[in-house]
Image (cartoon, grey):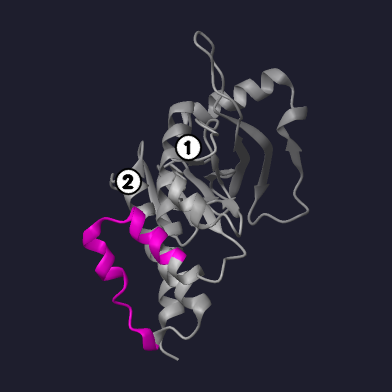
């Protein structure tokens, strides 16, 4: 049920045994529901929600829900929204990271830092950027737990001086550094330089075909601009929290759409 920690109780497993289960991003949901699917969904919701919220969930006016499928969807979303808000980080999403100001437009995010010499812009999109961090903690019959979902988006770095832009495309690297080792958190996928506006005619070179020493020098260059491993980790933490807030907004939007009076 949670994206961060998913838990399937024995009672719920029995209640949907006839129809089977599917696991997805939000946890476990019933498929091919039995004839009493509405009651089953309601019982599952009541089982996991605090008692004070049961009545509030069922105060949705019946005249605003026109089909059985809509009622089941609204009941599930009520449960899921509560679960996601509970499992999400309570920390305030920052407005800057290491001197880079953050601005957001829906799924798009930009971090900017300016000086008399240059302007640096880091941009990324949080869509389709999350996946599980770590392995299943317990794959037993009645319980599944997963580590937190983490956003690690591909990102663009544009360093602008006058009318010329030095541009990098970067991605987070898999795996974690072992004790006593030093591993880069991100790597350079591509680098290019151009004047004015970018177009498909601009030449770019892939990071994995760069001279090894040149690659290291470019990584050092980015680190001098504040784009270090530490910065990349903080940016991933921000992206994870921001993506989660967008996910909750999506669930709330679907719920409101479903109950709107026709």
- The percent position of residue 240, horizontal first and vertical second, equals 45, 45
Q: Residues within 10 Å of mark 2 (few under 14, many from 20)?
A: few
Q: Quadrant of residue 33?
A: bottom right
Closest to the camera, between mark 1 and mark 2, is: 1
- The percent position of residue 164, horizontal first and vertical second, equals 60, 47
Q: Give the side of residue 67 with respect to residue 218, left or right.
A: left
Q: Give the side of residue 212 with respect to residue 242, left or right.
A: right
Q: Residue extending furthest top?
A: 180
- The percent position of residue 161, horizontal first and vertical second, equals 53, 44
Q: Give the side of residue 241 with respect to residue 122, left or right.
A: left
Q: Is residue 53 magenta?
A: yes
- Identify the mark at residue 94; answer none if there is no mark: 2
- Residues 137 and 35: in front is 35
Q: Secondary structure at mark 1?
A: loop
Residue at 76% over, 55% down: 200
Q: Residue extending furthest bottom?
A: 262
Q: Secondary structure at mark 2?
A: loop
Tell me, yes or no, if residue 254 can be seen here: no
Tell me, yes or no, if residue 12 can be seen here: yes
Cα gap from disc 1 to disc 2, whole angstroms: 28 Å
Residue at 47% over, 35% down: 147
Q: Quadrant of residue 78?
A: bottom left
Q: Give the side of residue 15 with respect to residue 154, left or right.
A: left
* 119 over 134 or under it: above or below: below
- Identify the mark at residue 145; answer none if there is no mark: 1
* 2 over 82 or under it: above or below: above
Which span is picked out in magenta? 40-63
Which is nearer the N-term, disc 1 or disc 2? 2
């Amino acid at each position: 049920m949670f994206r961060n920690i998913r838990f399937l109780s024995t009672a719920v497993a029995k209640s949907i045994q006839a129809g089977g289960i599917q696991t997805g991003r939000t946890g476990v949901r019933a498929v091919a529901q039995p004839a009493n699917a509405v009651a089953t969904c309601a019982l599952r919701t009541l089982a996991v929600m605090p008692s004070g919220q049961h009545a509030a969930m069922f105060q949705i006016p019946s005249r605003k829900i026109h089909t059985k499928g809509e009622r089941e969807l609204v009941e599930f979303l009520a449960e899921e929204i509560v679960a996601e808000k509970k499992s999400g980080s309570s920390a305030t999403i920052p407005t800057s990271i290491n001197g880079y100001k953050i601005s957001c437009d829906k799924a798009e995010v930009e971090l900017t830092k300016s000086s008399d010499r240059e302007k640096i812009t880091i941009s990324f999109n949080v869509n389709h950027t999350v996946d599980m961090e770590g392995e299943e903690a317990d794959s037993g019959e009645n319980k599944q737990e997963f580590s937190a979902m983490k956003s690690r988006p591909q990102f663009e770095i544009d360093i602008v001086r006058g009318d010329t832009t030095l541009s990098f495309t970067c991605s987070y690297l898999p795996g974690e550094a072992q004790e006593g080792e030093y591993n880069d958190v991100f790597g350079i996928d591509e680098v290019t330089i151009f004047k004015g506006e970018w177009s498909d005619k601009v030449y770019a070179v892939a990071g994995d075909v760069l001279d090894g020493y040149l690659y290291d020098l470019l990584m050092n260059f980015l680190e001098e601009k504040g784009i270090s491993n530490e910065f990349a980790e903080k940016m991933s933490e921000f992206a994870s929290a921001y993506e989660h807030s967008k996910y909750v907004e999506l669930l709330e939007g679907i719920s409101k759409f479903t109950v709107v009076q026709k």
